[in-house]
Amino acid sequence: MWNRKIVSWTAVSVAFLVSVISCGSKSGGGEANVEEKRPKSEVQVPAFNADSAYQFIQAQADFGPRVPNTAAHGACGDYLAAQLERFGAQVYNQQADLMAFDNTLLKARNIIGAYNPDSRKRVMLCAHWDSRPFADYDKDPAKQRKPILGVNDGASGVGVLLEVARQLQQQAPAIGIDILFFDAEDYGTPAFHKGEYKENTWCLGSQYWGRVPHVSNYNARYGILLDMVGGKGATFYQELFSKRTAGKQMKKIWDAAHQLGFGQYFPKRDGTEVTDDHVYVYQLQKIPCVDIINYDPEGDTGFGDFWHTSGDTMEVIDRATLQAVGQTLLYVIYHEE
């Protein structure tokens, strides 16, 4: 059993522009909008811009490691909230004091952007925006207690979703969309930790959101989580917890990827089971959530040789991978009715 995310290795634009909320929760209730169904042949899906997503990733990397309780973390959080506001979302900043594995108090911040907030037909799109405080899988022992830049593991999913937000402002889909940037996902127990291993030390932001959603009585049809979605030659095998709890939605996503010509990135094969934010979305809110996460069945860790190392930098990011993930995501949400 790997400490980070692996549980088992058994087999892996806007309809309305609304005011921005600066902090805390706000009710997003109200009656559902009357939304006309469009024939699927007439659905216009925006073209995902991988260059734009790449620049959003670069902007996060430019802040440095986004570890909770650091100045870089605070500045990047402000940037992300401002980008969602700029792209027409109703923004919620969910502040929380969360306890890390070593009893460090983390000043965490979940950032949520809601599109068409009055619609009861909703899909949630998620990624974590923090970066790991330890390069615990680095081959150089001198680097293992230093923070990583977390470009693929963290920033890539956020970059894709910011480009999705930009498209949502320009062309509204038929449903409401919530973009959730979870914090404190990657502050879990490091490999070098000698003390007692504690359960649930990962994904602290999504655990908090699962218990205290940003709006009361929140619900969504399903969620899609992006984690490590920018690496060169990435393969997104079908993660097993997602397959058990969100199998219908997973099939929809993988079928769309193959229809669009991205089958090489989305093999219809089982991967592993991963402890990631989607687990707590499902366990605490009962919302099926599909984890699109890179998995390398031939690698030592399953996540690439730069995973949780000082090598997780812009050099590992490939626009072709971003294009495959982003265009598939847009296809799925714009065909939702």
Image (cartoon, rainbow, N blue to C red):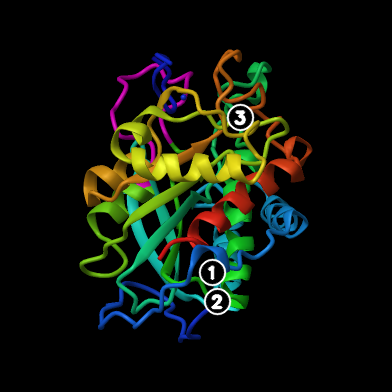
Q: Residue at x 66, y 16 (%)?
A: 139
Residue type at the position of mark 2: Glu
- Asked if residue 276 is positioned above or below residue 161 in the image, the reply reads above
The residue to which callout 3 is attached is: 235
What separation in Å lies between label 1 and label 3 (alpha carbons)?
30 Å
The residue to which callout 2 is attached is: 85
Residue 7 point in image, percent of width and height: 36, 22
Q: Residue at x 57, y 48 (%)?
A: 157
Residue 305 point in image, percent of width and height: 66, 21
Residue type at the position of mark 3: Thr
Q: Residue at x 54, y 46 (%)?
A: 256
Mark 3 nearby-residue class (10 Å; few <14, some 14–19, many ≥20):
many
Task: Name the magenta segment's main secondary structure.
Answer: loop
What separation in Å lies between label 2 and label 3 (alpha carbons)?
32 Å
> Which of the two discs, 2 and 3, sits closer to the camera?
3
Q: Which residues are magenta?
A: 188-204
Residue 256 lies in the magenta stretch? no
The residue to which callout 1 is attached is: 81
Mark 3 residue element: loop
Q: Residue at x 51, y 41 (%)?
A: 255
For residue 106, side relative to residue 295 (left or right)? left
Identify the image quadrant of residue 56.
bottom right
